[in-house]
Image (cartoon, rainbow, N blue to C red):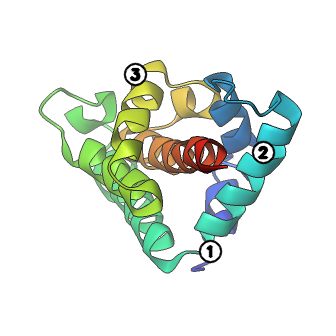
Amino acid sequence: MFEIEERLAARGITREALVEAGMALYVPHGLEAGAARARLDALIARHLRDPNVAALLVGALLLEEELVERRRASELGSDPVFLVADEILGMAVAEVIAGTYARFEFSRYDRAKPGILGTLGPFLDDAAAGLVAGCTSRLYSEQVEG
């Protein structure tokens, strides 16, 4: 959808890197790590095809380009405390995928910023964290539901 996987990969944000970030904070819920990794990869692939998730991720790409990269001297590049649009965007991605529970999972990934998440700018790190958090939250919920 919107070539989002390719657009993210062009910035080094591959599905594999997203899975690695997700697995960095994985909490076993009766699913061994190898199976969880495969399931997480499938969930990320599925949700990258969701037009709502893809649209939010395109928004993050455009915001990153317009507000951070084109304005190198901008204070937004350092992700200042007054910038909350990036957090809202990340939470929206997570909630589109897995509802309210995902908001709490988003907080874990947003704070820790494992793997690729720690290398991204303010909009992309939160949008990618939202994608990972939504998918891991769904993974946990599906495992508990059996």
Q: Is residue 10 at all visible to an observer of this figure?
A: no
55 up-or-down from 135: above or below? below
Q: State the separation of the CA atoms marked 3 and 2.
A: 21 Å
Query: Going 63% across and 51% down the picture, which residue do you hit?
Result: 11
| Nearest to N terminus: mark 3 or mark 2 | 2
Q: State the separation of the CA atoms marked 3 and 1.
A: 27 Å
Q: Is residue 37 at all visible to an observer of this figure?
A: yes
- The residue where tag 2 is placed is 16
Q: Position of residue 23 (x, y in %)?
A: 70, 30
| Nearest to N terminus: mark 2 or mark 1 | 2
Query: Going 37% across and 55% down the picture, which residue do you hit?
Result: 99
67 up-or-down from 110: above or below? below
Kind of residue at disc 2: Glu
Q: In the orientation shown, which residue stands out farthest toward the top?
A: 112
The label shown at residue 49 is 1
Kind of residue at disc 1: Arg
Q: In the orientation shown, which residue stands out farthest toward the left?
A: 82
Kind of residue at disc 3: Arg
Foreground residue among 56 and 10: 56
